[in-house]
Amino acid sequence: MAAHERWTRLLEVLGDRGRLEVGEAAELLGVSAATVRRDMDELANQQLLVRTRGGAVLSGVAYDLPLRYKTARRADEKLRIARAAAALIPPGAVVGLSGGTTTSEVARELATRADLAEHSKGTALTVVTNAINIANELAVRPHVKTVVTGGVARPNSYELTGPMATMVLQGISLDFAILGVNAVDAGNGAATHDEGEASANRAMALRADRVIIVADSTKIGRRAFAQVCGVHEFAVLVTDKEAPDEVVEQFAAQGVEVHCV
């Protein structure tokens, strides 16, 4: 298991338990106690946990993993989802992209799509985003017009939130909005853990002709604190093949176009 995978797993378990002993972690990860101690020391240096005698306890940010540690989770599924979502976007479209690991992959897929990259003149695609990491990647692509909202940056997701982000989004029109969420349920719709992110994502959804939700199967059939949009407000759900059939059928019954890839 690579270091980033171990770190992600350690933070996930700490998020669930609040405290973790070195011996428990070594058994859980299948590595030596010395390796766990080094991992915990490194995460403590990054202020992602607090070291204790014989283990570690939860810090203020461990419940919501920074984006750089989330990228290793279900990476293959997220890449397939991103490719499928990017394929739905025609050249010349204006696309809103929220922050998140899956939407970051969507941005990379759009940036390198052959029919867009080979566009000889003008703008092949306009992307409006409130995620500074996505803007950073797209800004170097001359065929992509990149528009960034204002707002306050959340360190865990790199998303700009708050009144400034909402104000910019309320003044534009989008052909598509591709939104990454923490949970999507056939009864409660799409949601995130943070109300600030949900507010910005909701503003983006309201300005789009067609809303696409991208979420791997671990988020399907789950609920989160702050609603982004109801089921009737998004047209497409792109997920992976492990999504429960009964939940997929519930979305389809409500008119949502579901892609399991």
Image (cartoon, rainbow, N blue to C red):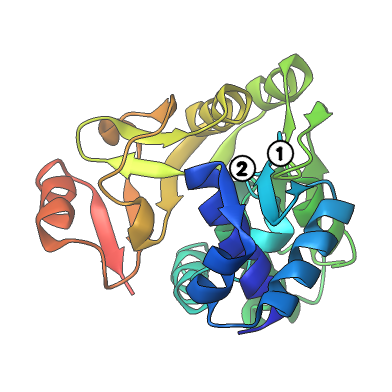
Q: How busy is the neighbourhood of tag 1: few (under 14 within 10 Å), some, or many (20 plus)? A: some
Check disc 2 and report its element: helix, strand or loop.
loop
Q: Is residue 136 left or right of residue 235?
A: right
State the quadrant of the C terminus: bottom left
Q: Position of residue 237 (x, y in %)?
A: 34, 53
Callout in the foreground (2, 1): 1
Q: Is residue 85 above or below residue 257?
A: below
Q: Which mark is residue 59?
A: 1
State the quadrant of the N terminus: bottom right
Res 225 → quadrant: top left
Q: Is residue 141 above or below residue 177?
A: below
Q: Say what amino acid the circle numbered 2 marks.
A: Asp
Res 154 → quadrant: top right
Res 110 → quadrant: bottom right
Q: Which residue is mark 2?
A: 64
Q: Residue 211 or 157: which is nearer the viewer? A: 157
The residue located at (42%, 26%) in the rendering is 227
The residue located at (61%, 49%) in the rendering is 95
Q: Position of residue 25 (x, y in %)?
A: 57, 66
User: Residue lying furthest front in this view?
Assistant: 53
Q: Is residue 158 left or right of residue 192?
A: right
Q: Position of residue 245 (x, y in %)?
A: 13, 62
Q: Position of residue 226 (x, y in %)?
A: 46, 24
Q: Is residue 16 left or right of residue 96?
A: left
